[in-house]
Image (tube, rainbow, N blue to C red):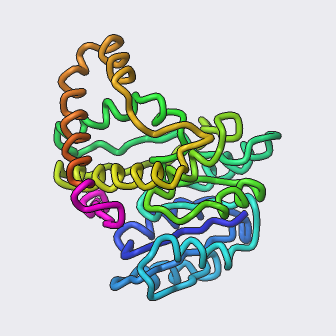
Amino acid sequence: MSIVIPAHNEAKVLGRLLSGLLESARPGEFDIVVVPNGCTDATARIAASFGDAVRVAETPEASKAAALRLGDGAARGFPRLYVDADIELRTGDVRALAKALDHPGTLAAAPHRRLAMNGRPWPVRAYYAVWTRLPEIRRGLFGRGVIAVTEEGHARLAALPHVMADDLASSLAFAPDERAIVGAAEVVVHPPRTFGDLLRRRERAAAGTDQLEEAGLDQPGGSARTGPADLAAIARREPWLVPHIAVFLAVAVIARRRASRTGTTTWQRDESSRDF
């Protein structure tokens, strides 16, 4: 199977990811392609330091979409995984995702998500306490930093236009019965370490959702919008989360206002989550 990793200035975290992927992999088991794009740091050098286990396809263009296309062209096999450089994924998780794709009718899969919340301030923890309870967050493939597809699923993704919210678009490209969240696989996702970086990340998400809806890409897999009914249901089940819901709403409102000013082409990167 092939693993494509687009990486823009990911020298801080790329080694952590690659070490986990190769932790107990057999020689030649994974075809890993790292695509350093527009890097000004040691991303390419770190990828190359893993020797024959990792192939490097570098481009001067700082573009995730272009990096994914380049990585796709270099990749050799299926299933195919697209993995963000700032998450943690291990050998066994990759194998579990591949096994899930053997199920008839399953075209795409993603791992169970674990958030690394140590050291995050209360507003960030409050936001994610609500976010992780939202129905679409629980069942969607997005927000995990990794998606695995069969060859048929890959064809579905290849037909999508390039958008900012690429993981959300990838999730919505598949109907619920075509995708799977694999409990036997776990990805560790690193949320922002500051409230400011949380706002930047959510501003990007809001702009990306607008872009998807403008392009008509919010079907057949549903919508990523959070409705009042979703938040009301959380408040009824767990009343202690009401202050957290207030934080969630405040972040959503601020992020949407910022996104409406900056438009759908500005990439707001969160740097703090890459510090460890």
Left/right placement of residue 9 relative to residue 112 reads: left
Q: Is residue 86 magenta?
A: no
Residue 73, image quadrant = bottom right
Residue 29, image quadrant = bottom right
Query: Among all residues in the image, which is located at the extreme bottom?
Result: 60
| Front residue of this view, candidates 119 and 268 | 268
Q: Quadrant of the N terminus?
A: bottom right
**Looking at the picture, how far across and down is residue 259, in whole percent?**
27, 54
Q: Is residue 271 magenta?
A: yes
Residue 153, image quadrant = bottom right
Residue 193 visible somewhere in the drawing = no
| Front residue of this view, candidates 150 and 12 | 150
Q: In this rendering, is residue 48 above or below 184?
A: below
Q: Main secondary structure of the magenta part?
A: loop
Q: In this rendering, is residue 28 above or below 44?
A: above
What's the magenta region? 260-276
Left/right placement of residue 274 relative to residue 75 reads: left
**Looking at the picture, how far across and down is residue 208, in whole percent?**
40, 54
Q: Quadrant of the C terminus?
A: bottom left
Left/right placement of residue 154 relative to residue 247 reads: right
> Residue shown at 34%/85% (left/top)?
40
> Residue shown at 60%/40% (left/top)?
221
Q: In this rendering, is residue 34 above or below 158?
A: below
> Residue shown at 41%/37% (left/top)?
225
